[in-house]
Amino acid sequence: MRSIISKITTIVTISIGASLIYRSAFFMRFVAVSLSLIAQFFFWKTAFSGQTDISGYTLESFFGYLILANLSYELSQPHNVMVSDHIQDGSLNHFLLLPYRFLDLVFWKLFGDRLAFLLASFLPFVVCGILFWTKTSSGFNISPLGIILFLVYTLGGLILHFLMDFNIGLLSFWFQKSDFLFVMKEIAVRILAGLWFPFTLLPPAVQSAFEWLPFQFLGFIPAHACLVPSLIGWKTPIILVLWIALLYGLYLWIWNSGIKRYEAFGG
Amino acid sequence: MIRVQSLTKHYKIFRRPTGLIHSLRSLVYREYEKIEAVKEISFTIGEGEFVGLIGPNGAGKTTTLKILSGILFPSSGTVDIDGFVPYEKKRKFLQRIAFINAQKSNLWWDLPARDSFLIHQAIYEIDNHDFKKRIQQLSAMLDVASFLTIPVRNLSLGERMKLEILLSLLHCPRIIFLDEPTIGLDFVSRRQIRKFLINYQATSRATIILTSHYFEDITDLCKRLIILVEGRPVVDEPLIRIQEEYKDYRIVRIRSDDSAQYKLQFHEQIVDENLEFTEFLLPAPRAMSFFHGHTNLELEIKPVSLEAIVKKHYEKHNIQNHHNRYDFDRS
């Protein structure tokens, strides 16, 4: 057990160090997300003009949701996983020779990277949040339970998102490139993760369909759980665990079949 | 102990002629070709041996090493390394091997090498005391102590390669696969790495398999040579025996306007030729007696290098025809 923890802490710590070298990348990503949020703020401000709420959301609670959903999404982004590249250029060789699973190494490296992102971007997000809530006096609070649920579901979202990208990357054992699947996934995520608006604005039939999908954990659920913890039912964590189990099972199957086809090109 | 029996590896590659029509056609129909990278290789390597695996590009050297290290699954045949089947990638097996390749770095690019070493320590569960001792010992042998805290991207190729070797040997592997470890390095760095490998093998008694295109690497390091040509071993002998076999031979280089007649006469013995000169591998007495008194040529007699011997073997297996024979005079 000690050696497992030692491996994880070493990889995570060194990954944080490596990620913080690219401070400008974090900053640029933060600027891009902020600009997108500002644009959305003005869009929804116009939509809210003349009415105090839409489907029970005030402008403030609506925008609070958007900030949290986007923060959660950014934290669960599997940046630099590059499984497809490792397979295509043969750099997977190095990982295959280690007495440690490739999946674990890449995941803990990503976890460190996301922690570094949280450290580098958390402060600006908090400042934005405080300014926003102070200026708009929205009247709602984020409880400690809300913060814990936000972190737990964001971690769940990170695992899900990582497994999705990892599995898509592994398809490079068969296809020369699996990038097109990433594009499709990105489009699906943008809509189905609730990054533009909460699902509660949608018709009940669509809402109930979305409730069974994994994408909700990449934005909607963490934000929703943070703002209104009591609305998260018992079904939600079960769906999360089932999706993680399904994607993990899929990983095992793809990996075990794909590795036999691996050709280790490039020197 | 390494036992390889009837090892083969096939690849399927996609071939497509150039042009828009072929590009569009390839969307719905693709032609694949089967490449036999390794054909029926069998050999045994004992503990502590230092073996050179050489051959022209595409001979199957790296593919063989990748199968032996477990990176690739063989198409057929068996490999047994100290009782392990490499592709099963058992933890105990992976802990006793190292694969060093100059073209693929295992070090984290933006961080000092020391950070990569720490990850290696955690993954291989190396005791803290042993880890420190090992770094001290290996960095002194490789003369890299001052580079450990510099980000890898700021180091020269030679410095990076030495650190790469250090990283790969931290867990005291018993079997080491060296895939062209000195490629692209200047002669000073090459010599330093060779010296390190000689000393390392002398002290650790590790089993080492080396592929290289540099003959100094082979002659300085290896006691045994396996020559692969087109995926098959054509020679597997102790280096000393190969050299002894040719001890009475010489390389005869001639420059002559009538070189065509010599080529015709000794065409089996040609080891190199170009527009300026032709080289033959001939028994010394025959060379002396045959060329004695010839006035229409400029003659140079040199000792036989390993390179010439290996070239001769390539020639014998018809490789030269595919690669680098310039038949200017015969055409």
Image (spheres, rainbow, N blue to C red):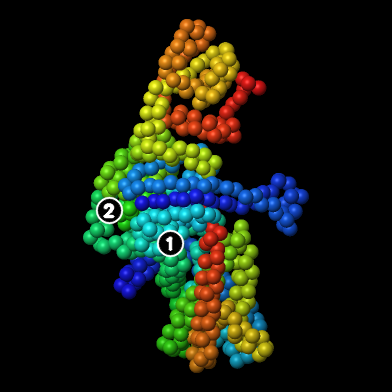
Residue occupying the far right of the picture: B21
Identify the residue at image location x=66%, y=52%.
Answer: B32
- Circles 2 and 1, Cβ within 8 Å, touching? The answer is no
- The residue identified by callout 1 is B89
Residue A135 image position (x, y, % from top left): 50, 83
Q: Is residue A33 above or below residue B258?
A: below
Identify the residue at image location x=25%, y=52%.
Answer: B136
Residue B115 image position (x, y, % from top left): 34, 59
Query: Which chain is indicated by disc 1?
Result: B
Q: Is residue A184 above or below residue B190?
A: below
Identify the residue at image location x=54%, y=58%.
Answer: A262
Query: Judging from the image, what secondary structure is the residue with disc 2 in?
Result: helix
- Residue A89 visible within the image: no
Please tell me the numbered disc located at residue B210.
none
Number of numbered discs: 2
- The residue identified by callout 2 is B135
Query: Judging from the image, what secondary structure is the residue with disc 1 in?
Result: loop
Q: Amino acid at mark 1?
A: Lys
Residue A54 image position (x, y, % from top left): 63, 89
Name the foreground residue: A202 vs B71: B71
Rounded to the nearest angstrom, the CA distance separating label 2 from label 1 is 26 Å
Q: Earlier in the sequence, mark 2 or mark 1?
A: 1
Name the foreground residue: A212 vs A230: A212
Q: Is residue A229 above or below residue B85?
A: below
Label 1 Cα crowd, 10 Å radius (few <14 / some 14-19 / many 20+):
some
Q: Amino acid at mark 2?
A: Ile
